[in-house]
Image (cartoon, helix red, strand yellow):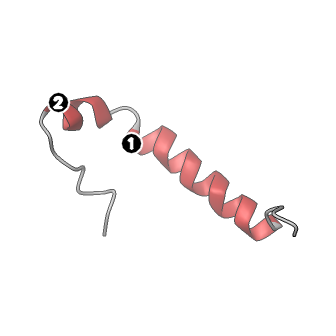
Amino acid sequence: MDFTLSEEHRQVQKMVRDFAVREVAPVIKEFDRKQQMPPFILP
C-alpha cells in the first residue's frame, strides 16, 4: 500500500500549515490561557 501524498494533498497540507503558522501560532497561547477557541479557526 502506498501512503505517499499526491501533489494536491501536499499543496493542501502546506496551505494549512502556512495558515497555522501565520494566523494561529501568534495568538494561540492567549486563547488557551482564556480557555477559548479562536473564532477564525472553524467556520
Q: Which mark is residue 43?
A: none
Q: Quadrant of residue 36?
A: top left
Question: Which quarter of the figure has residue 12?
Answer: bottom right
Q: Which residue is mark 2?
A: 33
* Element at label 1: helix
Q: Quadrant of the C terminus?
A: bottom left
What residue lies at 81% left-to-right and 65% top-to-bottom? Answer: 7
Left or right position of 31 against 10: left
Q: How many marks?
A: 2
Real-space Cα distance between discs 2 and 1? 14 Å
Q: Earlier in the sequence, mark 2 or mark 1?
A: 1
Q: Position of residue 27 (x, y in %)?
A: 30, 35
Is the residue marked by circle 2 packed among few (<14), some (14-19), or many (20+) residues within 10 Å? few
Left or right: 37 in relation to 26: left
Task: Name the kind of residue labelled 1 in the image.
Answer: Val
Q: Which residue is mark 1?
A: 24
Question: At label 2, which amino acid type do we have?
Answer: Arg
